[in-house]
Image: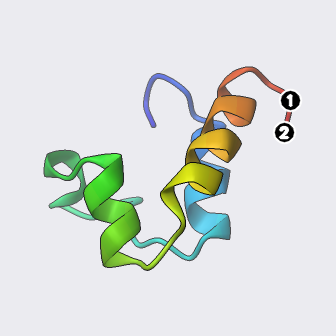
Amino acid sequence: MRKWPATVAVVLRHKMLCVGCPIGTFHTVTEACREHQVDEGDFLVELELAIRGER
């Protein structure tokens, strides 16, 4: 999230509590998606779009 700040909006849109979570830095995207019942494939597409500035 530090490297690509636009991804923060994606995380928050999915109601994931990773932003500001002290454990968040230790979780992979797969683990976070599983924990929050978020479809990982869709989430990754949204992250990539945010990184490219397309969302």
- Packing grade of label 2 (10 A; few <14, some 14-19, many >=20) is few
The foreground one among 49 and 5 is: 49
The total number of labels drawn is 2
Residue at image mark 1: 54
The foreground one among 9 and 42 is: 42
At 13% from the left and 49% from the top, the residue drawn is 26
Secondary element at image label 2: loop
At 46% from the left and 22% from the top, the residue drawn is 3
Residue 17's tag is none
Across and down, in percent, residue 40 comes to: 49, 56
Secondary element at image label 1: loop
Residue at image mark 2: 55
Kind of residue at badge 1: Glu
At 33% from the left and 62% from the top, the residue drawn is 32
Measured Cα–Cα span from mark 1 to mark 2: 4 Å
Q: Mark 1 near mark 2, Cβ–Cβ under 8 Å?
A: yes
